[in-house]
Image (spheres, rainbow, N blue to C red):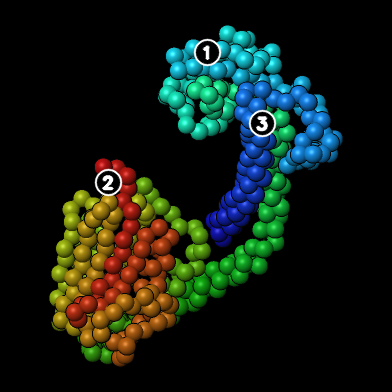
Amino acid sequence: MKKARVKFLLAAMLAIFVLLTSLLGVINAVSFTMAAADADRVTEEIETNHGMLKKDLRMSNGMPAESRFGPMGPESPDMGPSLRYFTVTVDNSGNAALITYNITAVSEQEAASWAKELLKKTAGGETVDESLSGWTRGTYRYRIYRFNNTTYVTVVDQAREMLPAYRILIISLIGEGIALLLGAVLLIFVSRRLFRPLEEADRRQKNFLSSAEKEFKVPLTIISADTELLERAHGSSEQTQAINRQIGKMKNLVRTLGAYAVFDEEKETADSPLTALVKAGAEDRQALFSDKNTVLKTEIEEDVRAAGEPETYRRIVDELLLNAARFAETEAVLRLRTENGRLVIETENDTELPDGEYPQAFDRFTRLSNAEGTEGAGLGLSYVRDKVLEMGGRVSAKVMGGRFTVKLSLSLPERRRS
């Protein structure tokens, strides 16, 4: 349950982070886009006046200067004198001449050199056919255009105009950090109240299954001991063998129920010798197949290791073999191999089921149509599916050409792949 709560917190925090980042990202993108549009509007006006900005805005389109409106509201008549920019002309021979210089942050020599550098970088030093604009040195907006066989390069200092956009960016980052911190505190508080009933239900489930396991073990032990005494006194009979079989099935059912009592306390080791585990599991269940007059074949790749608890893999292999033995008509095959960087465990047996996918085979207390007349609670493959999914793997069950195949696929340890 603790791991489930941690996963909930991580998922919720990730959702909040994505939502805030998307929202603030859009706001900042719009802010910087508008700043760039304002800068382009200024450089376009300079281009219209062949490298100079009109200082006199008394009249425009027949309206007084005081009434002229721009994208963000009325324009100030002081915009011209306060604008920091320079314009350099470059002729076809590459000679640069400064025609407008209204900036103190850049010397006249640096302005000419800077203009030639921009022309070389953006147009490859060749003649431009249309206006080009962009950012240079962070907060400077440039425009390259041509008039009367002369190339013009205008650079406008937008540092002051870009300040609000950068302030919004900084405030957004700080605000997102504070929001994530407050969100984490709130989610921790909420998760405690949210998971409290689940933790209580999980505790009761574990106590119930633990008590049921103990209650089953006592009578099963007594029945097993009495059956052994009967066999010693009178020899083995069909009745005592049937009792022993039922005792084994009950013990297996109790063991399976006990596995579901563990909610999130699974243990994992770095590496498990899977080849040896699968071979041992096949040897242990050979007698079961022989008793049913069926054949168990194995195709086991050597030196296969996998990440996970060895006992988990023993249970998985055992449940696969029990399922194959229960439904095989004449033969079954147990395979272990690696393919495409993944581990594959597979059982295959002949069957009368029609072709198709059978994902319901992994559902708890579910029995397929060929299970009529057989015994079992339908928990074995459900356990297999749950454990494989916990380890990040995939499971499938299908019938093709009269062969029922259960396939598990898991990631291999990194060093095993190399």
Q: Are marks 1 and 2 in contact (CB under 8 Å)?
A: no
Which image quadrant is residue 143 in? top right
Q: Which mark is residue 45?
A: 3
- Residue drawn at x 22%, y 58% is 337
- Residue drawn at x 50%, y 68% is 261
Q: Earlier in the sequence, mark 1 or mark 2?
A: 1
> From the viewer's perspective, is 106 left or right of 339?
right
Q: Is residue 377 visible?
A: no
Amino acid type at image mark 3: Glu
Mark 3 or mark 2, whichever is nearer to me: 3
Amino acid type at image mark 2: Arg
Q: Earlier in the sequence, mark 3 or mark 2?
A: 3
What residue would you read off at disc 1?
96
Count neighbours of disc 1 (C-alpha within 10 A) and say few if under 14, some if 14 to 19, many if 20 or more. Answer: many
Count neighbours of disc 2 (C-alpha within 10 A) and say few if under 14, some if 14 to 19, many if 20 or more. Answer: few
Looking at the image, is 126 positioned above or below residue 70?
Answer: above
- Residue drawn at x 63%, y 30% is 48
